[in-house]
Image (cartoon, helix red, strand yellow):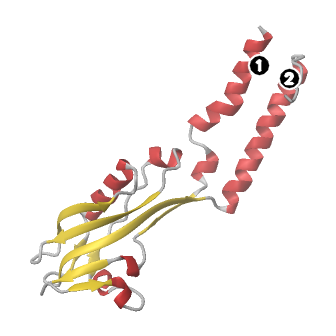
Amino acid sequence: MTSRLVRTVIIHFVCIPGLISSPALLAQELLFHSGSAADSSAVDAKGARHRGNDYPGRAPWMDDASNIVWPRYPYEEKVLRHTGSGLFGLTLDLNTGSVSKIRTLKSTGFPKLDYSATDAFRQWRWKPRKWKEIEIPVTFTLRRTGQAAELERYLESQRKESFERYRREHGVPSPTPSS
């Protein structure tokens, strides 16, 4: 009976907080970048290929973007801590500047992250009659802020205190370290 009760308490204090929306996860800074200009390239209306590293600073095709929609970082992917970098090829309608086709040239490694990027790219627009194709790198990362790390340490100390209080109140022996 005692063993079953201890197992239930451990599951409650250790596993359940990880399954629900963790405050530490919510305090993490979500990052999405469209990569550096050096990793990007484009084909202009005349068919000439331009590479991002040919330009200091921002690539000219990014200056010509009139509508940029950043990808959503799917909740499930955040919880699973999935991150990745990919490269996407966009074919533009020369007359409207809208995206007519998207190719995944290099996957982020996770289908939901790839889908989120392509879904956002469908909404991008450029100045008409300037660019035919654009290759854009993307990176999805999770970075803990100082506040998140502090909150995680606090929650862990609270879990330990609660377990120890329960153990003392119910006469459950302390776990012995295995050798």
Q: Is residue 102 above or below residue 93?
A: above
Which residue in the structure is indicated by mark 2?
A: 167
Q: Is residue 79 left or right of residue 74?
A: right
Q: Quadrant of residue 129?
A: bottom left
Which residue in the structure is indicated by mark 1?
A: 6
Q: Earlier in the sequence, mark 1 or mark 2?
A: 1
Q: Is residue 153 left or right of residue 132?
A: right
Q: Amino acid at mark 1?
A: Val
Give the residue drawn at x 43%, y 54%. Answer: 73
- The percent position of residue 86, horizontal first and vertical second, equals 37, 62
Q: How many marks?
A: 2
- The percent position of residue 131, horizontal first and vertical second, equals 18, 81
Q: Quadrant of residue 165?
A: top right
Which of the image's four quarters has the N terminus?
A: top right
Give the residue drawn at x 68%, y 27%. Answer: 12
Identify which residue, 8 or 43, lies in the foreground.
Answer: 43
Q: Quadrant of residue 121?
A: bottom left
Give the residue drawn at x 44%, y 64%. Answer: 139
Q: Amino acid at mark 2?
A: Arg
Q: Residues within 10 Å of mark 1 (few under 14, many from 20)?
A: some
- The percent position of residue 82, horizontal first and vertical second, equals 49, 50
